[in-house]
Image: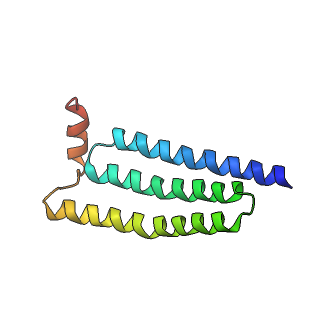
Amino acid sequence: MSTIVELLSNLLLLLGSFFVVTGIVGLFRFPDFFTRMHAVSITDTLGAICILAGLMLHSDSEWLVVMKLFFVLLFSLLTGPAASHALAKSALHCNQKPLLGDDINANTNSGD
């Protein structure tokens, strides 16, 4: 039984790491602020869920550790989307416009 839990824990840790690395790639590859922010916020939340769930399984049923990790997960789920929304709203308030249609093609062909 412990090998199955250990295997699932390792799988969740690897999957969470994959999501975080994917978000980092999106941060460098996407053309504007809004697409970069979207890529990072989605993968950051999924990565945190997977990594913290893997750590909960890895803690060998120490309930204090599991509860602390659960509260960190809950805090992350509540603050991550709210922070992303606040950043997007602030960028729009400061007249930052998302790239649309022809703007994307012009930006990728300009050599940036």
Q: Is residue 81 above or below residue 108?
A: below
Closer-to-camera residue (66/11)? 66
Q: Residue furthest top?
A: 111
Count of marks, rendered view: 0
In the rendered view of the protein, which quadrant contains the N terminus? bottom right
Q: Is residue 45 above or below residue 79?
A: above
Q: Residue 8, position in %: x, y?
A: 73, 52
Image point 56% across, 59% down: which residue?
49
Scheme of image coloration: rainbow
Q: Is residue 26 left or right of residue 70?
A: left
Q: Is residue 76 above or below residue 1?
A: below
Among the 4 quarters of the image, the one containing residue 54: bottom right
Closer-to-camera residue (27/98)? 27
In the rendered view of the protein, which quadrant contains the C terminus? top left
Q: Residue 107, position in %: x, y?
A: 21, 39
Q: Is residue 8 left or right of residue 51?
A: right
Q: Residue 68, position in %: x, y?
A: 58, 66
Closer-to-camera residue (25/97)? 25
Q: Residue furthest left?
A: 95
Q: Is residue 19 left or right of residue 12?
A: left
Image point 55% across, 45% down: which residue?
17
Q: Residue furthest right?
A: 1
Image point 49% across, 47% down: which residue?
20
Q: Is residue 22 left or right of residue 61?
A: left
Image point 26% across, 47% down: which residue?
32
